[in-house]
Image (cartoon, rainbow, N blue to C red):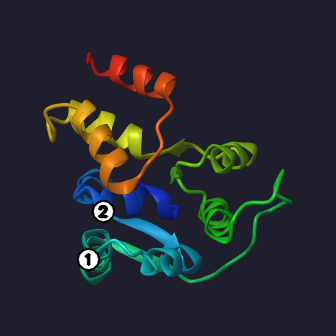
Amino acid sequence: MLVVSNTSPISNLAIIGRLDFLRQRYVSVLIPAEVAVELAASTHPAGLLGVQTALADQWLRVEPPGNRVPRPLPFPLDPGETAAIALACQLSADVLLIDEKRGREAARHFGLVVAGVLGELIHAKFASWIPNVRDEIQRLRRDARFYVDASVEHLTLSQVGE
């Protein structure tokens, strides 16, 4: 499975010590150079170490720059999101990992399949890698300052029977 990621899913999973979920599920994940720069600028020591380890182990790989998005984005996005969408389009990725609402909307505009941190936690629960999703969401909020809308949290937890 060919997977491309934006900064947020990698950074947030690394901060809560769950980055290996991506390795277990996808074997390898590709990122554009812009995302690598954003990840390297992390101020969270554990998150930065997790990313550096993933890069050193070469399951998280920086893909050389290629073409830009095939047509203009429906609205401006940050450089990492734009580059991740462009790379996913260029490689015909099976999945683009992206959390930001507008980024997901733009990715869908190009016909990309999107997933994010919460979807990865749902998968982890069903794979018996974690006992529950609720505690992981609390850790995301506390440690990574990850925003989860109450209705999205309710839907996520209902999908795993919590």
- Quadrant in the picture for residue 79: bottom right
Which residue sits at x=55%, y=80%?
33
* SS at circle 2: helix
Query: Would you say the residues marked 1 and 2 are in contact, meaning their CB atoms lie under 8 Å apart?
Result: yes
- Give the class, few, some or many, for how many residues have Cα within 10 Å of label 2's Cα (few <14, many ≥20): many
Residue 14's mark? 2
Q: Quadrant of the N terminus?
A: bottom left
Image position of 160 (left or right of 103):
left
Residue 81's mark? none
Closer to the camera, 6 or 141?
Answer: 141
Residue 49's mark? 1
Figure check: 97 above or below 129: below
Cα distance in 3D space between marks 1 and 2: 8 Å
Which residue sits at x=23%, y=59%?
20
- Residue 95: x and y in percent read 51, 50
- Residue 54: x and y in percent read 28, 73
Figure check: 38 above or below 105: below
Image position of 143 (left or right of 69):
left
* SS at circle 1: helix
For residue 133, say whether it is visible. Answer: no
- Residue 109: x and y in percent read 75, 44
Q: Quadrant of the C terminus?
A: top left
For residue 9, say whether it is visible. Answer: yes
Q: How many marks?
A: 2
For the residue marked with disc 2, what is the amino acid?
Answer: Ala
- Give the class, few, some or many, for how many residues have Cα within 10 Å of label 1's Cα (few <14, many ≥20): some
For the residue marked with disc 1, what is the amino acid?
Answer: Leu
Q: Earlier in the sequence, mark 1 or mark 2?
A: 2
